[in-house]
Amino acid sequence: MFPIQRGRRLRTNEAIRSLVRETIVTPSDFMFPMFIAEGTNVQEAIPSMPGMFRRSVDLTVKEVKELYALGIRAINIYVKVNDSLKDNAGIEAWNPNGLMQTAIKAIKDACPEMVIMPDVALDPYSIYGHDGIVEKGVVLNDETVDALTRMSVSHAAAGADFVAPSDMMDGRVLRIREALDKSGYTDVGIMSYSAKYASAFYGPFRDALDSAPVDNKEIPKDKKTYQMDYANRIEAIKEAIYDVEEGADIVMVKPGIAYLDIVREVKDAVNVPVAVFQVSGEYAMVKAASERGWLDHDLIMMEQLMCIKRAGASIISTYFAKEAAQFLNK
Ligand code: PBG
């Protein structure tokens, strides 16, 4: 080995380092998660996610055009639903004139090339803050899946390119695929949140949508009967394989940074693109530490995105998408 082998030769300067670099990150790798609010000309800051806003549809459309100009080609959308429209069954979720459906149509009209992946789950519509219908303290599976299929078809009818079920009910990918096909939406894809863990990293997101499980003895206080136990890896592989067999075009692992071992294993186990969601709590941690001057914001942001890609992600859903695209375009 030494002195014939000297690993440092390939690290001599930036030109050589760039020649041998194995991974690149570009703006078209990103999906930008966006929060939609009712009204017009509304832009509300989300305190636990500095730099993120809930915006009304009109301002969202403006933002989408900016994102497109920066090279971002896909967005995830989430809606903040008025309490008066919430119930246990999530009926508002498939209202053809609901906030989500209206947003999809407006974005498609204004920026047809932007790939839209609306979130499919009942939590923003649920009085209990659960991703499914709750009965006698249990989140019902099959009844919830029926609701999710209606929701998915309504998203497709509004113009969504993909639907993105984030609920972790069993069998929902198969039923959604069947429902889309039956309604003539054979070209609308499914990006499944396949390996989604019951994680405390989702805290700021639940603030943004006011969607945390309610504090009530009759209602499960967390999502552990459907989201996965973060002690486990085998079931992540199993869930991803099931979803591909059920018709998922893209599978997702979530959260990101603390779960990169899972990303690599899922990547090696399936033959579809793997997406990773760098979630709200991960974003908040970087913002908080860099606001205090304890970490260099841009360096940490780019390091995390690169490491997520290196682990096997083809796509990264990240609140840093816009800032990272600006950084890369500099
Ligand atoms: C809801 C959903 C959640 C996230 C995406 N879709 C929250 C949850 O499951 O409680 C989290 C995203 C984030 O934290 O950035 N089904």
Image (cartoon, grey):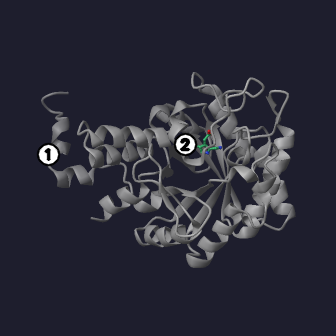
Q: Nearer the viewer, residue 267 or 41?
A: 41
| Amino acid on which disc 1 is placed | Thr
Can residue 248 be seen here? The reply is no
Image x and y of residue 192, in percent: 66, 47
Q: Quadrant of the N terminus?
A: top left
| Amino acid on which disc 2 is placed | Asp
Label 1 packing within 10 angstroms: few (<14), some (14-19), many (20+)? few
Q: Secondary structure at mark 2?
A: helix
Find disc 1 in the rendering and name its residue. Answer: 12
- Residue 90 position (above or below residue 268): below
At horizontal 67% and vertical 34% (from top left) the residue drawn is: 213
Q: Quadrant of the C terminus?
A: bottom left
| Residue 179 located left or right of residue 67 | right
Instruction: Kindly indicate the quadrant of the structure image that contains residue 181.
Output: bottom right
Find disc 2 in the rendering and name its residue. Answer: 207
| Residue 169 located left or right of residue 67 | right
Q: Do labels 1 and 2 touch, CB within 8 Å?
A: no
